[in-house]
Amino acid sequence: MATATSEFMPASAEQPSDKQRLFLRYFTGTLIDLVVLNLFNEYSDQVYVDTFTTSLLAAILLQLLLKGTIAVEHWVAGFFHGKSGGFMTFLRFFCAWLVLFGSKFVILEALAMAFGDSVRFEGMFHGIVVLIIVVVVMLIAEELVVRFYRRLN
């Protein structure tokens, strides 16, 4: 006998507010970043995080910086969006790429300032390549979770 999911909900259940949804999205993103960071720490010799607490704080900082980067990238793309012409289209994509690529140096420096030698990315170009790989895996993991969640309807 199939039972509707609404029967499992308490009678006082309310729809979440926009603030609650936003909190849950960032909370989930931070947990995903934490898992990815710790998996790289465990299975890669190019990522080092000294303690779980440090990795949790680093995941929070990464989440904030990544969301800030995406907001700046959207703002830059929006600035060029209304402009016509091939050169403006080129500038739109080039500046978006510049923000996304340049932000990794800001993120690396922010991690170094916040955690010193407690969080290290080592390898080519002072660890920037490994950081880019870690960040890309974080973004892919977040996107996969969001897509899985949306398919649950």
Image: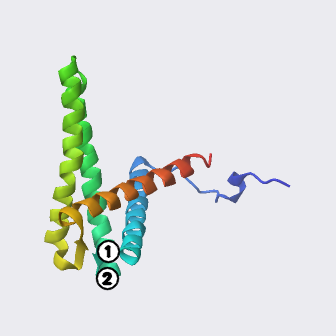
User: As rendered, which of 114 and 95 lies closer to the eye?
Assistant: 95
Question: Element at badge 1?
Answer: helix
Query: Where is the C terminus found, in terms of image quarters?
Result: top right
- Please name the residue shown 18% across and 78% down the image: 117
Q: Which residue is mark 2?
A: 51
Q: Are marks 1 and 2 in contact (CB under 8 Å)?
A: yes
On screen, residue 11 versus residue 133, left or right, reads right
119 relative to 110, above or below: below
Question: Element at badge 2?
Answer: loop
- Please name the residue shown 28% across and 46% down the image: 70
Query: Where is the N terminus found, in terms of image quarters?
Result: bottom right
Q: Position of residue 135 (x, y in %)?
A: 33, 58
- Please name the residue shown 41% across and 75% down the image: 43
Q: Position of residue 90 (x, y in %)?
A: 21, 27
Q: Residue furthest front?
A: 124
Q: Position of residue 2 (x, y in %)?
A: 81, 53
Please tell me in which quadrant of the rendered image residue 126 appears.
bottom left
Please tell me in which quadrant of the rendered image residue 13 appears.
bottom right
Please tell me in which quadrant of the rendered image residue 141 appears.
bottom left
150 relative to 60, above or below: above
Q: Residue furthest top?
A: 85
- Evaluate whether residue 79 shows in this view: no
Q: Which residue is mark 1?
A: 55
What's the residue type where badge 2 is placed?
A: Thr
Q: Where residue 43 is drawn, which disc sits there? A: none
User: As rendered, which of 30 and 113 lies closer to the eye?
Assistant: 113
- Evaluate whether residue 125 shows in this view: yes
